[in-house]
Image (tube, helix red, strand yellow):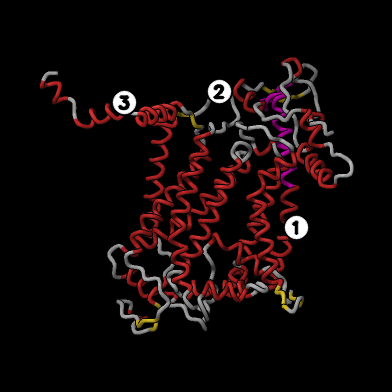
């Protein structure tokens, strides 16, 4: 080899060439080639995962920076910082260190506010992912584990946000911790030991020191959950949306580059908001005090549904049993919220059991084509929204000059009737949209042009759908007739199986079978209700 050729071959090229000859190098090259050949769909619903990842990156970086100056301790010290109003006041070391970060550490306030804003956006992005996954049916086999991992990510984000909410030890977070203490004490038999374990004695005890490790453990836990979920997603080809052909872009480099660009944009927007919009001004709230509570205090939005559940319980719900006083005002909300979250986590398994559908699904559903599932999802959103809104009952009463009892009564009625009404209306809307799609397949779409026939009759001209639009409407994951008959037929003498069959009828009876009529029958009159799938 000549000297010129030797100079042109650098160290990086030689190292890459030698690495490529090894077993690990060959496997890595094959994996990269597989990623380059994998096509992922381009759709706005795929962006929420990138938003959540950007939030997690901001939380991690800012959290590591804040660790160097924050002191997780409830020990009392005299404040001697630059904020004159609190000069000489007795505050906890946690509060004093947070004030020092906000006013004395360079860009400390920016870092702290970026940490808080990212923690607010993270649950929203995960909830949006859950909603998209639910309404499109992307939780079905072989992606049920991905749904559970996404739910666990939400729980971890809620736990991290709640624990971080208390760490500044200001009046707002102190009020929230006092509520937590009351909830824990309301649990029979184990309430007092749990309270002592959590707080380490009389309120506030050592709650800051106990919550700090939990807050630190959340980010590594979320990183593990994301890594496992990413591995599962790579194991299966991504589900596709309805429509002709393989629509999408290569994962490498196109989709990865788009995701990286959006990641940087979200991080930039978070930093811009943090630099211009104040959040959690603890210097205005003042330090936490066991004997005081902030008027109109509100939790962060993602835990509002827990606070709202407590506010909607009627007063006086108590009973005495087993030599204990059972405070239903605490136990009932805990039971309802726990059951709600467990139903969310288990829904893929419940639907599979009801329908008896154990197939692998790689085609995403349009929400209108599964009215029952969509109705259940909207009912769940309404249930969550009512609890979330009830957390601000006092603020609503003060803002509109109405009695808080009346506001609570309205939310109580909405909690009882809202989900059922939302379920029924959503099913009817979905069925109406299905009939509209069937009419378009049968008769074409309305052009808005009115013509007069030779007999004097005025009619609107319809045009046939183009091939791609027709394929999009017909590209539906249809259950087989035999599967429908098997799911809706219950053996006698088995109450659980009869219940499953009845629920299956509700699912299948709300679907209209797509039908692509011959061209000579497009203008024929046909009632869309005749297209309903026959049930067992």
**Left or right placement of residue 326 versus residue 109 in this view:** right
Task: Name the N-terminal-most of marks 1 and 2.
Answer: 2
**Left or right placement of residue 262 versus residue 520 in this view:** left
Residue 109 place in picture, x, y as percent: 34, 64
Task: Name the N-terminal-most of marks 1 and 3.
Answer: 3
Question: What residue is rendered at 25% in x and 31% in y?
Answer: 15
Q: What residue is shown with label 1?
A: 417
Q: Any magenta on residue 435? A: yes
In the displayed structure, would residue 527 be above or below residue 280? above
Which numbered mark, 1 or 3, is in the foreground of this view?
A: 3
Magenta: main secondary structure equals helix
Task: Assign the N terminus to one quadrant of the image.
Answer: top left
Question: What residue is rendered at 78% in x and 28% in y?
Answer: 481
User: Which mark is drawn over residue 21?
Assistant: 3
Q: Residues within 10 Å of mark 2 (few under 14, many from 20)?
A: few
What element does badge 2 sit on? loop
Q: What residue is shown with label 2?
A: 245
Q: Tell me how far mark 1 sits from mark 3, CA to CA.
A: 67 Å
In the displayed structure, would residue 100 be above or below residue 344? below
Q: Where does the magenta region start and end? A: 425-452
User: Which mark is drawn over residue 490?
Assistant: none
């Amino acid at each position: 080899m000549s000297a010129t050729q030797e100079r042109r071959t650098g160290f990086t090229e030689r190292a890459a060439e030698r690495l490529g000859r090894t077993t690990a190098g060959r496997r890595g090259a094959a994996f990269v080639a597989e990623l380059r050949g994998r096509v992922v769909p381009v759709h706005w619903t795929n962006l929420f995962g990138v938003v959540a990842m950007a939030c997690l990156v901001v939380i991690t970086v800012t959290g590591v920076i804040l660790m160097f100056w924050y002191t997780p301790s409830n020990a009392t010290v005299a404040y001697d910082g630059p904020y004159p109003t609190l000069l000489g006041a007795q505050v906890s070391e946690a509060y004093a260190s947070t004030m020092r970060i906000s006013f004395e550490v360079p860009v400390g306030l920016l870092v702290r506010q970026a940490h808080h804003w990212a923690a607010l956006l993270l649950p929203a992005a995960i909830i949006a992912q859950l909603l998209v996954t639910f309404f499109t049916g992307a939780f079905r086999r072989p992606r049920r584990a991905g749904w559970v991992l996404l739910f666990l990510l939400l729980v971890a984000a809620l736990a991290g946000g709640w624990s971080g909410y208390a760490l500044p030890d200001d009046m707002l977070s102190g009020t929230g911790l006092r509520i937590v203490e009351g909830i824990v004490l309301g649990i029979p038999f184990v309430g007092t030991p749990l309270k002592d374990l959590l707080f380490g004695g009389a309120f506030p005890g050592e709650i800051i020191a106990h919550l700090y490790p939990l807050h630190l453990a959340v980010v590594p836990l979320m990183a593990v959950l994301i890594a496992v979920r990413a591995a599962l997603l790579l194991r299966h080809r991504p589900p596709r949306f309805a429509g002709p052909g393989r629509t999408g872009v290569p994962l490498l480099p196109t989709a990865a580059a788009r995701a990286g660009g959006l990641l940087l944009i979200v991080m930039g927007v978070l930093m811009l908001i943090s630099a211009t919009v104040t959040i959690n001004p603890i210097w205005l709230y003042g330090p936490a005090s066991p004997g005081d509570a902030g008027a109109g205090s509100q939790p962060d939005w993602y835990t509002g549904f827990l606070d709202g559940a407590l506010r909607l319980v009627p007063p006086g719900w108590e009973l005495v049993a087993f030599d204990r006083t059972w405070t239903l005002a605490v136990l009932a909300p805990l039971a309802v919220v726990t059951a709600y979250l467990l139903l969310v986590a288990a829904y893929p398994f419940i639907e599979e059991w009801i329908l008896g559908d154990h197939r692998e699904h790689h085609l995403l559903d349009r929400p209108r084509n599964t009215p029952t599932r969509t109705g259940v999802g909207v009912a769940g959103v309404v249930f969550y929204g009512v609890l979330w809104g009830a957390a601000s009952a006092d603020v609503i009463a003060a803002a509109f000059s109405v009695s808080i009892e009346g506001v609570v009564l309205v939310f109580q009625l909405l909690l009882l009737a809202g989900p059922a009404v939302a379920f029924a209306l959503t099913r009817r809307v979905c069925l109406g949209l299905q009939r509209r799609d069937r009419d378009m397949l049968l008769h074409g779409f309305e052009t808005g042009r009115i013509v007069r026939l030779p007999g004097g009759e005025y009619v609107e001209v319809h045009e046939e759908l183009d091939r791609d639009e027709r394929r999009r409407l017909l590209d539906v994951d249809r259950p087989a007739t035999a599967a429908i008959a098997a799911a809706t037929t219950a053996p006698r003498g088995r109450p659980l199986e009869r219940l499953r069959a009845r629920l299956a009828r509700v699912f299948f009876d709300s679907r209209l079978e797509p039908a692509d009529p011959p061209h000579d029958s497009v203008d024929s009159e046909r009632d869309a209700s005749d297209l309903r799938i026959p049930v067992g």
